[in-house]
Image (cartoon, rainbow, N blue to C red):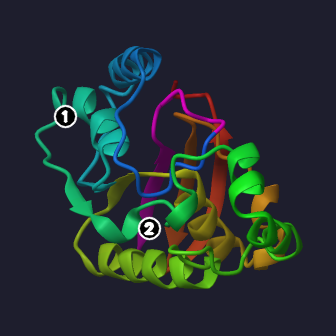
Amino acid sequence: MKRVVYLLRHAHVGREETFIGHLDIPLSSQGVQESQEWAQRMEDLELDALYCSDLLRATQTAEPLLDRLTLQPQLLADLRERNMGDWEGLSWEDVTRRYPEDSRHYLKNWAGAIPGGESLSQMKRRVLAAWKEIWSQSWDRAMIIAHGGTNRILLAEFLGIPDRNFFRIAQDHLRMNWIEFTEGTPTIKMINSRIFS
């Protein structure tokens, strides 16, 4: 039995110089336009299920696609980006000034816990729990609209990539990953591609 997952990062938000994490910010005007254009090119794609992070930037990315599908997205909080705690809304310059010791520790161990936030391992547990829930449902072709960190965790899991190589997986805004499962075994057919956008 074959199943297909299309894994997408949300569209542009215009705050790339800051730690966004769980902040519920909308798409930029550029992101709104890009997601509308992308949805037009996706109108012939057949899907049985659509899953989204419950954060606004993911659900807004999905909205134009919903006009062309009969599906309603299932919103999963566990698909959210990493919780950056006290650093959310701050630039790296702000963080180094306000939290000098914590920022030095982060440079040595970026996967560790962030003050008021979560570690990579904590995020990984919840994202993989969301994936287990998605996998248990009935579909042949599903789309997941989430975040850069979320997508990297899923792709690393599918590929058997260790956490230390997490950032070697590019995940740009509104880029598609295509994963095909045969008897539960994943094969990455496409990664971080503009082919659909």
Pick the front one: 4 or 93 = 93
Residue at x-position 34% and y-position 24%: 39
Disc 1 from disc 2: Cα separation: 25 Å
State whether residue 94 is above or below residue 64: below
Residue 4 in which image quadrant = bottom left
> Where does the image place residue 42, in percent across and percent down from the top left?
37, 28
> Where does the image place residue 138, in percent across and percent down from the top left?
22, 72
Residue at x-position 67% and y-position 47%: 191
**Residue 173 visible in the snapshot:** yes
| Mark 2 burial class by Cα count in 10 Å: few <14, some 14-19, many 20+ | few
State whether residue 96 is above or below residue 29: below
Residue at x-position 40% and y-position 51%: 23
Relative to residue 196, is residue 50 drawn left or right?
Answer: left
Residue 28 in which image quadrant = top left
Give, as a three-letter code, the residue at label 1.
Leu
Give, as a three-letter code, the residue at label 2.
Lys
Q: Which residue is mark 1?
A: 66
Where is the N terminus found, in terms of image quarters?
Answer: bottom left
State whether residue 87 is above or below residue 33: below
State whether residue 44 is above or below residue 47: above
Residue 84 in which image quadrant = bottom right
**Residue 84 visible in the snapshot:** no
Q: What are the residue bounds of the magenta stretch?
A: 1-17
Magenta stretch: residue 13 in it?
Answer: yes
Q: Which residue is mark 2?
A: 2
Q: Secondary structure at mark 2?
A: strand
Relative to residue 175, is residue 137 drawn left or right?
Answer: left
